[in-house]
Amino acid sequence: MKDKLTRNEHAGTNDYKSNLIELMATSGVLMFGDFTLKSGRQSPYFFNSGQYKTAEQAERLSEYYAALIHEKLRGKFDVLFGPAYKAIPLCTLAAAALFRLYGINAGYCFNRKEVKTHGDGGMFVGHQPAGGDRFLIIEDVISAGTSVREVYPLLKSAADVQITDMVISIDRIERGAGGLTASAELHRDFGITVHPLVTVVEIIEHLHNREIGGKVYIDDEIRGKMEAYIAKHCVV
């Protein structure tokens, strides 16, 4: 079993990009093959955050989110929000890491898929939206921005909250139907700026012909397939 990394190797440093890329590769989150996306496109690569499954992986991932948030967004938010379902653990883990590493005591909140009609009831768990709150959305990967389009009106109808930024693990930088990336569409439609920890281009550059634990994850052949897909469907 791989030895646990020391905190200095993966927490709160400018290396969060390369560390995250290697974590995704070794954890099986980054996958290669022939995948059909929701858009119907056939992609030679796929990102599945459901492959994170150990406490160490969760800790490391949370610290990479916290590092980016502290670097780029400190002072700009009050509450971290994770759209159900995959972003719920990301949101809570990132909030804990922000406090543990940087002393930032932010609120955290996530939505239910259906309104609870018994007990405490309601749509939201954790911090309840209140007027003037600055919400920072936390997600794993952005494709069409569907989850944001679903939760944005829910949050705005609950209270006059501000939602100006979003943090994600990976930006596939793919064009939508209108030719813009999903990130650009969210900024155009809602004024939300998307901050990715890494982009697919950065992943290729870091992993190409690099041996990690005795394995090369992106060789010349895989890089060629990825770049052909990017040239056809992405905005670089």
Image (cartoon, grey):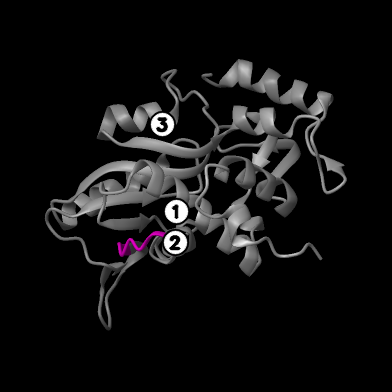
Residues at marks 3 and 1, CA–CA distance in whole angstroms:
20 Å
Q: Please tell me which residue lies in front, 200 or 206.
A: 206
Residue 137: x and y in percent read 35, 49
Q: Please name the amino acid that badge 2 sits on.
A: Leu
Whether label 3 touches label 2, CB < 8 Å: no
Please state if 59 lies on the left or on the right of 29 as rendered.
left
Q: Earlier in the sequence, mark 3 or mark 2?
A: 2
Magenta range: 101-108
Q: Quadrant of residue 71?
A: top left
- The mark lying in front, picked from 1 and 2, is 2
Q: Is residue 43 visible?
A: no
Residue 101 is labelled as 2
Q: Determine the residue positioned at 38% across, 65% down.
A: 99
Q: Quadrant of residue 78?
A: bottom left
Look at mark 3 in the image and give the residue it sits on: 183
Image quarter of the N terminus: bottom right
Q: Determine the residue positioned at 25% across, 76% down.
A: 121
Residue 51 is labelled as none
Q: Determine the residue positioned at 37% across, 41% down.
A: 72
- Circle 3 SS class: helix
Q: Please tell me which residue lies in front, 77 or 144.
A: 77
